[in-house]
Amino acid sequence: MKILLEIQVLRSPWSIQTLYRLFHQCRKTFAPLNLSDYEAIGRCEQEVPEYFNFAGDVLDKWSQIEKERKEPSNPALWWINGKGGERKWSFEELGFESRKVANVLSGPCGLQRGDRIIVILPRIPEWWLLNTACMRTGVVFIPGTTQLTAKDICYRLLASKAKCIVTIDELAPAVDSVASKCQFLKTKLIVSESRRAEWLNFSDLFKAASAVHNCVKTRSQDPMTIYFTSGTTGFPKMVEHSYGSFGLGFFICGRYWMNLTPSDIVWNMSDTGWIKAAIGNVFGPWFQGTCVFVHAMPQFDPKVILNSRICAFLSSDISNTLKHCLSGGEPVNPEVMEQWKSQTGLNIYEAYGQTEVGMICGNMKGMKIKPGSLGKAAPPYDVQIIDEKGSVLPPGKEGDIAIKIDAKRPFTFFTRYVDDPVKTASTIRGNFYITGDRGSMDEDGYIWFMGRSDDVIISSGYRIGPFEVESALIEHPAVVESAVVSSPDPIRGEVVKAFVVLSPSLKTQDLKKLACELQDHVKKVTAPYKYPRKIEFVEQLPKTITGKIRRSELRNKEWGQI
Ligand SMILES: Nc1ncnc2c1ncn2[C@@H]1O[C@H](COP(=O)(O)OP(=O)(O)OP(=O)(O)O)[C@@H](O)[C@H]1O
């Protein structure tokens, strides 16, 4: 079964008294940070400032607060490698080191404000230093996952016109194999103990660099970062975000969805290449002065997580350690939610969002959770369900999940799809931004996900969302996971087909009998017209490198469109 939990907030090891003292101290020290202003901006109740830079305006303020505090603070970054290696950075140390890296970028790497850099690094501290150094220099940060192949890297280098790439030993040969085709690439920087021909060495340059650097003054609309989407439905798109949309845009998320304070420790398990790393590893926690815990595990491994030093350090019992659990990016089936709750005693606070617009809706701390729903619209968004003409649909009606745009785009929106004005414009229908997902809203304002617009199945006139059928299937003990798509049918036009991964202990069963059993099971737990008329058992499902199921690939196969 796919583990959906991505971000956890862990209870601090400090005593209640210390937390209480810190809380009052922080209340006093919040003033210079203007947290209430940031909150008002985040809710679109106050104008976005003309100039904003997360490194200069937030990180450097926390560093100042740290200095003024008499008691030790939580570190800004706490990193372990799982092999006994451990390091902790205060906000001040982070500032010092990231200024050195800023000088590496603008010195030996020859990068100027507005230039683009691709950073393909695992969960190592250099990723955080480079991210911050880019803000300090105005260089546009483009992260990529270490699972990228030479072909993926080539696509990203060409599409982004990046002048510099940073990676590790394992990926350097892949970069070298495509570098000659990438005419914009000027500098290759390797994070490694050894030297490599034609590559600058990060540690050498870092040691030699000065720590004196003045953070550039950036306008809130200036481009700060480009994220490639997951590529679930086609080639990944280049989503450009600004200092305002990313830097300021995640305040509400960190405060109300992640429920963070300066005394918390957050552990975000998503890959450094995805927007969830920006939310959970940088902007969400650091806006609140929260410690980011990083375990450098190369791949998501639940056993490593449960045995991790942080769990052992804080408590031997995970259910006593965790305070708040979060998930986003893919739907959480009610069954998974129930199992998580029975093991940990905690709910999973799910959020729904996109690389383009960040968090669209979610379950904020304190809200009643309706398992299977995406929660309610997240400030500053007014989320509505609309029809094809752009009219708002009443509660319970299925339609397009959309965000209301009044006179101007919310500042939290992406600036554009780089080099694709047509695609950028295509996201707007009347007064709405179209997410490309289908769902409904109930009387209480909770939004229910049906599936991506392209994934909805229309069988004999019935509209069926894959999520509901998959949620029903996973309740059966034989099912580990499933993907539901449309399949051609001479009478009904299309029917529901489920690709099912079975639990290893049940693979030897009579599969025909099991298929009938699963069909009966779905008919019992959801409206019978949704049951999968076709079932195929498979060893695994096709997924993007973010772990999202590529239903489009299965659907195309069904319809002979490969
Ligand atoms: N909590 C959630 N429940 C269901 N689906 C979700 C949730 N969070 C995100 N998603 C899905 O992920 C999409 C956003 O993901 P992302 O920005 O990574 O790009 P992608 O749509 O997967 O990739 P591409 O646009 O390249 O096909 C949403 O539009 C939605 O379909």
Image (cartoon, helix red, strand yellow):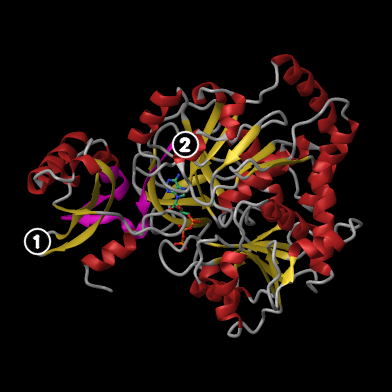
Q: Is residue 515 magenta?
A: no
User: Which residue lies most toward the top here?
Assistant: 17
In the image, what residue occupies the spot 53% across and 46% down?
Answer: 360
**Mark 1 belongs to which amino acid?**
Ile
Magenta span of residues: 445-470
Instruction: Name the residue beneath numbered marker 2.
Output: 375
**Mark 2 belongs to which amino acid?**
Gly
Relative to the observer, which residue lies in front, 338 or 296? 296
Indicate the quadrant where residue 165 lies. bottom right
In the image, what residue occupies the spot 12% across and 43% down?
Answer: 509
In x, y percent, where is residue 29? 84, 30
Residue 125 visible in the displayed image: yes
Q: Which image quadrant: the C terminus? A: bottom left
Q: Which image quadrant: the N terminus? A: top left
In the image, what residue occupies the spot 69% across and 30% down?
Answer: 261
In x, y percent, where is residue 412? 64, 52
Q: Is residue 449 magenta?
A: yes
On screen, residue 107 above or below 249: below
Dot 2: what SS? loop
Residue 218 visible in the displayed image: no
Instruction: Name the residue beneath numbered marker 1.
Output: 491
